[in-house]
Amino acid sequence: MINLSTKRKEIDTILVLDFGSQYTQLIARRVRESNVYSEILPWDIDEDKIKSMSPKGIILSGGPDSVTNTYTPRVPKIVFELNIPILGICYGMQTLAEQMGGQVISADQKEFGYVELKINNESVLFSDLQKSLNVWMSHGDQVQDLPDDFELVASTETAPIAAMQHNSKPIYALQFHPEVTHTEDGKVVLDNFIFKVCNASKDWKMDDLISNRIDEIKKQVKDNKVLLGLSGGVDSSVTAALLHQAIGNKLVCVFVDNGLLRKGEAEEVMETFKENMNLNVIKSDSEEVFLRHLKGIHDPEQKRKIIGRTFIDVFDTEATKLKDIHFLAQGTIYPDVIESSGSESKEARVIKSHHNVGGLPDEMKMELVEPLRDLFKDEVRKMGVELGLAPEMLNRHPFPGPGLGVRILGEITKEKTSILKEADHIFIQELIKADLYNKVSQAFAVYLPIKSVGVVGDERRYAEVIGLRAVETVDFMTARWAHLPYEFLEHVSNRIVNEIEEVSRVVYDISSKPPATIEWE
Ligand code: XMP
């Protein structure tokens, strides 16, 4: 994996110590978003490494463990000895409290989701903010007694100590997650820590990241050819542009038409990349082989694995035909890594296995190049803008690697993909027409494996059900269902039922993430 460690020496750094939270990378990216350099290290990193970075401040992430157990991660001694600002978040707060003489208990009631935070003491972290904020919580344990020399800053109904600060040192702790976009003014709280407590300067920018990544790619692949699986989505397009800048025509792209793409997508991708961008793209028509491998398979994880495996087989075949290919590039981004728990963190838990994570089979002698592996979608988009990619391409909604395969619940057949492609196309077309496409972060149709009764004219129609999903999110780690206008949904539903004979009913998904994921499988 390429990392961010090629930073210039003199840049102010905020170090994030990782205790295994799903949100650790989010903390680092929020810091980067404020143009301050940030690096993540595991909590048990060598103390000398922490010292050598001379951080301006340290943020302790959340994590899934409980400090009420003996052998769980703790803050290394050096963190306290450096006498620099510290901010503990969730588990980071709990271990900080416990190590400094406070008491942590497993609360009777777990707090999960939105809660109202009441700020009842002066604190630079909340300066210029209202006295009550809607914040995002996700915890079982909580601080019961303040450590010596700490004072209470804020509470919620069930967590009396939801924020605390040392009364003479720059040490702060929050039970909620300021890094999650759903926390009201969470960014202001983090910025207050970065700028008002740590006095960090804004001297880091996206250009540095691009040139660092290009150098890293050159260093990694040298004069060798690199094969890239191009899907036409934002991630693989930005990966292609980055690699193209780094190694020019040594980049060979393979576009796999697996039959699980959106309507008209294969033609569009070939036109954009081969004709407009002049990239070396080979199209592999593989619908038949994918459908054959997926025949009779109902389980979502098994479908993902088969699709991933078939992709790799196809690449392998193409690579063998091409000869001398030693590297395989992938547009893996951070949410793919964390949700497959191929994560760098030992403590994170598995949610779904994303097909492009988990490495290659041993017999495939190609090394991976994944230059976006620690970035979030919107950071990738920003990188794309800097690299000169077209806004229409960058603003396309994300499309999962397994494609319609995870949007057809249950077994996948050609007939179902055809129905879903049509329904999805109608939904997307209408979103664009109504100027709503760019207002939602992702929208798509889902094929539900049930039939329902409908009436069309005088006829009873016992037919398929299509689900529509549209969400609003910044980082795809959490998401809210989009409140699309009723009239709009009515119009889309009418079009789908009238134009697709096989469909008798349309439903709209009103689940947020968490607890639902964005995709249905
Ligand atoms: P979930 O469903 O996990 O989706 O909330 C979060 C984002 O990731 C996309 N997604 C995938 N992308 N391979 C991908 O490249 C996958 O296997 C995959 N599964 C989900 C999803 O579309 C959403 O944008």
Image: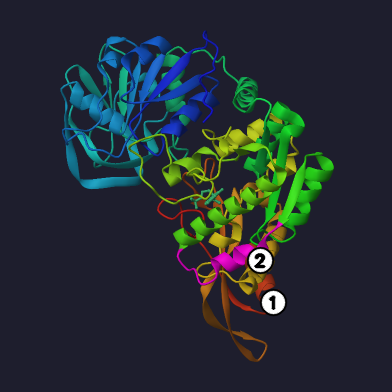
The first of marks 2 and 1 along the sequence is: 2
The image position of residue 310, as x and y in percent, is: 57, 56
Q: Quadrant of residue 285?
A: bottom right
In magenta stretch: residue 291: yes
Q: Residue at x 68, y 37 (%)?
A: 324
Q: Quadrant of residue 123?
A: top left
The image position of residue 5, as x and y in percent, is: 50, 20
Q: Amino acid at mark 1?
A: Asn
Residue 317 visible in the displayed image: yes
Q: Quadrant of residue 167?
A: top left
Residue 433 visible in the displayed image: no
Query: Which residue is labeled 1 in the image?
Result: 498
Taking the view exactly as shown, the residue that stands out farthest to the right is 275
Q: In front here: 419 or 45?
A: 45
Relative horizontal placement of residue 254, taking residue 332 as reference (left or right):
right
Image position of 451 with respect to 94: above or below: below
**What scheme was used to colour the molecule?**
rainbow
Relative horizontal placement of residue 277, taking residue 315 as reference (left or right):
right
Labelled disc at residue 288: 2
Magenta-drawn segment: 285-299
The image position of residue 74, as x and y in percent, is: 24, 26
Q: Amino acid at mark 2?
A: Glu
